[in-house]
Image (cartoon, rainbow, N blue to C red):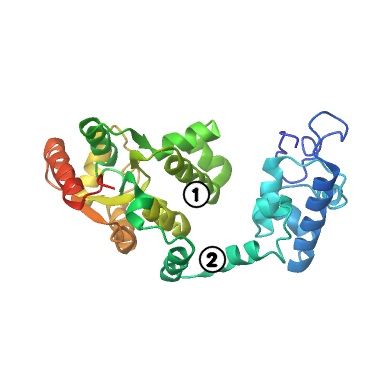
């Protein structure tokens, strides 16, 4: 598919290829995408004009797309799919998203509570949890708790590679995380985060991973994380969270925001129940890096996280 992206509502240039150049997708794929976009829009009762406003793709090009005459870019198709509350892969898959069992299960999965998801996973994948997690460790928690510092130090002591998930996201996307957020938004970032997590799990039997604090807010990704990694919540007091972030040279949490500490406490309170689902906890409050490292190594040994 054409790699160019349009620049916003009504932007015709860059939305379609000329239909004759090298790299044009197969006609069958174009027809399939056209039919599914049209069907999804009609099922939701969304006029083309409204879909244009929601997706940022011009009405003229949407008409071409639904007629099977548009060679849409991945970026624009992603916008259209999101505006239709569909996954972009459903618009291109050979399986019919409205009749296939896989699509139906995926829809039910997203609606199901987490305890039910875990029951389903245990039925579909009965392999012992310890074996699934192998010797993969993951440190979760808010920024400033010491995840990256301790992960790097523990990796050196245990001869394990250390990986920060945001660096994998940056490598995969070809841009800094801040730009990913600006371009794709929170939802787009979460999708890239889930893919990066699966990538790390598939490539590493032994690894220490540090993830962003908000990963626990995405139920599907967090459930996968806990099924494939031994998870440890690295925690500290709100005051130390803020102090450590500022010590790293980042003044953003406090700059022009006198309510930053109150907001931090709210975030901690809202996520506490999610963080507590980790297999273990490590409190770094009032401790030096070396003291916290020794506590972490003792915890890993005590729980047998590297004996799988």
Q: Position of residue 176 (x, y in %)?
A: 48, 33
> Is the Cβ of the residue at disc 2 closer than 8 Å to that at disc 1?
no
Residue placed at 76% from the left, 68% from the top? Answer: 43
Q: Give how far across and how far down residue 291 sits, in percent.
A: 11, 40
Quadrant of res 35:
bottom right
Nearer to me, 65 or 137: 137
For mark 1, what is the residue?
190
Residue that mark 2 sits on: 109
Q: Position of residue 157 (x, y in %)?
A: 20, 32
* N-terminal label among 2 and 1: 2
296 left or right of 61?
A: left
Mark 1, residues whose alpha carbon is within 10 Å: few (<14), some, or many (≥20)?
A: some
Nearest the viewer among 220 and 66 is 220
| Vertical position of residue 222 compared to residue 295: above or below | below
Residue nearest the observer in this picture, 203 or 106: 203
Q: Position of residue 292 (x, y in %)?
A: 15, 42
Where is 19 relative to 142, above or below?
A: above
Q: Secondary structure at mark 2?
A: helix
In the image, residue 25 sits, relative to residue 304, either above or below, namely above
Instruction: Point out which mark residue 168 bears.
Output: none
Q: Give the class, few, some or many, for how many residues have Cα within 10 Å of label 2's Cα (few <14, many ≥20).
A: some
Say left or right for 306 vs 27: left
Q: Picture quarter containing residue 254?
A: top left
Q: CA distance from mark 2 to mark 1?
A: 17 Å
Q: Residue at x 71, y 47 (%)?
A: 77
């Amino acid at each position: 598919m054409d790699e160019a992206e349009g620049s916003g509502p009504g932007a015709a240039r860059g939305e379609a290829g000329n239909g004759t150049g090298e790299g044009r997708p197969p006609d069958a794929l174009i027809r399939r995408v056209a039919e599914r976009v049209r069907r999804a829009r009609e099922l939701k009762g969304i006029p083309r004009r409204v879909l244009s406003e929601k997706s940022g793709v011009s009405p003229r090009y949407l008409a071409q797309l639904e007629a099977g005459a548009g060679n849409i870019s991945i970026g624009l198709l992603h916008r259209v799919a999101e505006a239709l509350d569909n996954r972009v892969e459903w618009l291109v898959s050979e399986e019919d998203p409205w009749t296939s069992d896989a699509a139906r299960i995926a829809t039910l999965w997203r609606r199901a509570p987490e305890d039910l998801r875990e029951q389903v996973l245990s039925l579909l994948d009965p392999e012992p949890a310890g074996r699934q997690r192998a010797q993969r460790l993951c440190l979760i928690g808010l920024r400033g708790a010491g995840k990256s510092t301790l992960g790097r130090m523990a990796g050196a002591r245990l001869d394990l590679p250390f990986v920060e998930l945001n660096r994998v996201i940056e490598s995969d996307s070809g841009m800094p995380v801040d730009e990913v957020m600006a371009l794709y938004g929170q939802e787009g970032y979460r999708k890239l985060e889930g893919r990066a997590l699966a990538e790390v799990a598939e490539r590493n039997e032994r690894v220490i991973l540090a993830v962003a604090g908000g990963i626990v807010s995405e139920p599907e990704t967090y459930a996968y994380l806990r099924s494939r990694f031994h998870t440890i919540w690295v925690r500290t007091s709100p005051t130390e969270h803020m102090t450590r972030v500022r010590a790293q040279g980042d003044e953003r949490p406090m700059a022009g925001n006198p309510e930053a500490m109150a907001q931090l406490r709210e975030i901690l309170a809202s996520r506490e129940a999610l963080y507590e689902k980790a297999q273990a906890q490590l409190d770094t409050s009032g401790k030096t890096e070396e003291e916290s490292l020794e506590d972490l190594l003792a915890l890993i040994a005590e729980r047998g996280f590297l004996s799988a």
